[in-house]
Amino acid sequence: MEGRTTDPPRQWPAWVNAIALLVAGWIALAILTLQVRPGATVVAVAFPPWWSTQQAFQAAASAQAAIVRATALPTLLVVRPDDHDGLARLHEAGAWLVMDAQAVSACFGR
């Protein structure tokens, strides 16, 4: 039994913890910043990125949302949803995210 040493259990590098904390902070900040404010009449809607511009426009129209403007990304639109269940209909039409239009316009405006 002489000469046998046990290896300490493997641990990930210390920088992985820092990266995980940084990513979690970015996600939390994005959630708080992009959240739709109560009473907002205009919202930004993100559709799947593989959709064409025409598909995104048709989906917004099928949800009875008035298109306010397009952004630099073809599947990210600024719309005015119908007052009655407008956000739910946007999700049913294929919207992935509904965000605050003011926060998005600063980043993705044309």
Image (cartoon, rainbow, N blue to C red):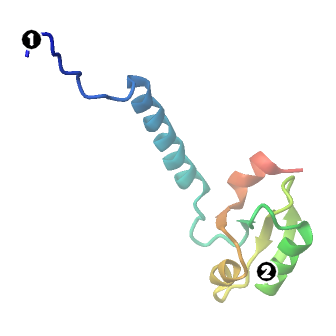
Q: Is residue 5 above or below residue 55?
A: above
Query: Can you give x and y, in whole percent of width and height, for residue 67 in the image?
Result: 85, 73
What residue type is disc 1 on? Glu
Query: Can you give x and y, in whole percent of width and height, for residue 36 in the image?
Result: 60, 65
Q: Is residue 75 above or below residue 2?
A: below
Q: Quadrant of residue 47?
A: bottom right
Q: Residues within 10 Å of mark 2 (few under 14, many from 20)?
A: many
Image point 23% across, 21% down: which residue? 7
Which residue sits furthest front?
1
Q: Nearer the viewer, residue 13 or 29?
A: 13
Query: In which quadrant of the rendered image does the N terminus lie?
Result: top left
Q: Which residue is mark 1?
A: 2
* Secondary element type, mark 2: loop
Q: Which residue is mark 2?
A: 65
Q: Is residue 60 above or below residue 49?
A: below
Query: Can you give x and y, in whole percent of width and height, for residue 84 in the image?
Result: 66, 89
* Secondary element type, mark 1: loop
Query: Can you give x and y, in whole percent of width and height, for residue 53 in the image?
Result: 90, 67
